[in-house]
Amino acid sequence: MFTPIQNPTLQLNARGAAVRDLQTLLNTRVSADYRVVVDGFFGPKTETAVKAFQYSKLLTRDGVVGPKTWQALKTNQPAEHPMIRQGSRGASVQIAQTLLTDARFYAGAIDGEFGPRTEAAVKKFQQDRQLKPVDGIVGRQTWAALAQMAQMLAFA
């Protein structure tokens, strides 16, 4: 249906057929509150809908529709993330910290550094969701629970 050639990177103020494709697909993936007019203009409302979608799929919430966002739009699946634990660094850690902050499990810096405070927040989240084991490691099961929570928070 969609190919990378048809789906260039899109952001605020972009125009054209690719934006219409984005808006059409986005409207099938977001709640009614975030649906947009399919007019081929990537305006502030489209950007807001993209950010909500990105959040719901565990993507960096930047409003830019690149390969990872297109993939999530096509599959309607959360982004894949590696297992992260104390000592891990990077975008996946930032995404986990953001979600844990929004759900009031974490009050530390969203800095992409998985330290003791992030580990404690993950353990609290795992206990709250009755995940086993409660080990402070964000693996497949914890990512799935975070994705489920993100879906609820994004479109609440």
Image (cartoon, helix red, strand yellow):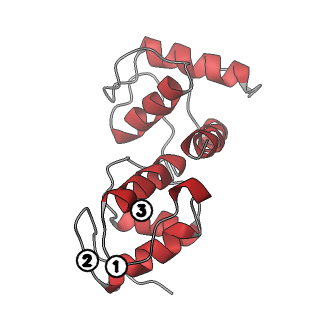
Query: Answer yes or no: do the residues labelled 2 and 1 have beta carbons within 8 Å?
Result: yes
User: Based on the displayed image, in which of its 4 quarters is residue 147 positioned?
Assistant: top right
Residue corresponding to mark 3: 69
How far across and how far down the image is residue 62, in percent?
A: 32, 49
Does 125 sit above or below residue 155?
above
The disc labelled 2 sits on which kind of residue?
Arg
Q: Is residue 53 left or right of residue 113?
A: right
- Residue 104 versus residue 9 in the image, above or below: above
Secondary structure of the residue carrying tag 1 is loop
Work out whether 108 lies above or below 72.
above
Q: Residue at x 25, y 77 (%)?
A: 15
The residue that mark 2 highlights is 15
Q: Quick one: SS at disc 3?
A: helix
Q: Earlier in the sequence, mark 2 or mark 3?
A: 2
Q: Give x and y (percent) for residue 32.
A: 60, 59
Q: Which mark identifies residue 40?
A: 1
Q: Residues within 10 Å of mark 3 (few under 14, many from 20)?
A: many
